[in-house]
Amino acid sequence: MARCVALLRGVNVGGVRVAMADLRAAVEELGHTDVATYVQSGNVTFTAEAEPPALARGLEAAIAEACGVSTTVIVLTAAEWEELIEHNPYPDETDGTKLHAVVAAQDYTPDQVRAARDLRDAVREGGSTDDLTVVGRVLYLHLPNGMGRSKLAEKLGRSRAAGQREATARNWRTVLALQERLRG
């Protein structure tokens, strides 16, 4: 049995609605225990027996059936979540809304990393101080002026080459809150 976190991509934004009560029920129907959601953006902590890839596939099917929503689900164990936090390349950023973890199901490929860095370099030529670092399947996004003003975040969000269409972002405040729930 392992504590896990599931991150749903693109729910409760852009008209794609999932009620958290329905999401919890779908996860419980799969036999998982200690199920809890955090905020409305599709974060679920739970205890399960299966491995994350199988859990993700099962959750995607259950959510589609129970909630009528087709979404990408990324699952990490509590140990993987701790590693995500430990590898933070921006430990001096204290504002949890200016640092984001963009988590993919698999490691970013060298081509995706190159594409993301090229976008960063392009916006920096325009004076931006936004930065990014990729570690495995996590793209750490440091946005000193916030997500809403970030040209880099905007460009990454539209980039197929940088692998963002298969990933989901959480601000650092959410990352740390989920850590506490996983430690539970």
Image: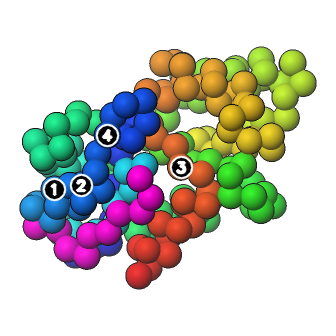
Q: Is residue 20 visible?
A: yes
Magenta-colored stretch includes residue 15: no
Residue identifier under label 4: 17
Q: Earlier in the sequence, mark 1 or mark 4?
A: 4
Number of marks: 4
Residue identifier under label 2: 23
Tell me the CA gap for discs 1 and 4.
15 Å
Say what secondary structure mark 1 lies in.
Answer: helix
Q: Do the CB atoms of the residues marked 2 and 3 lie less than 8 Å apart?
A: no
User: Is the residue marked by circle 1 packed among few (<14), some (14-19), or many (20+) residues within 10 Å?
Assistant: many
Q: Which of marks 4 and 3 is nearer the N terminus?
A: 4
Tell which tag, 4 or 2, sits nearer the viewer: 4
Tell me the CA gap for discs 4 and 3.
18 Å
Residue 111 locus on image (x, y percent): 54, 22
Residue 102 locus on image (x, y percent): 53, 43
What residue is drawn where x is 55% and y is 26%?
157
As drawn, the label of residue 26 is 1
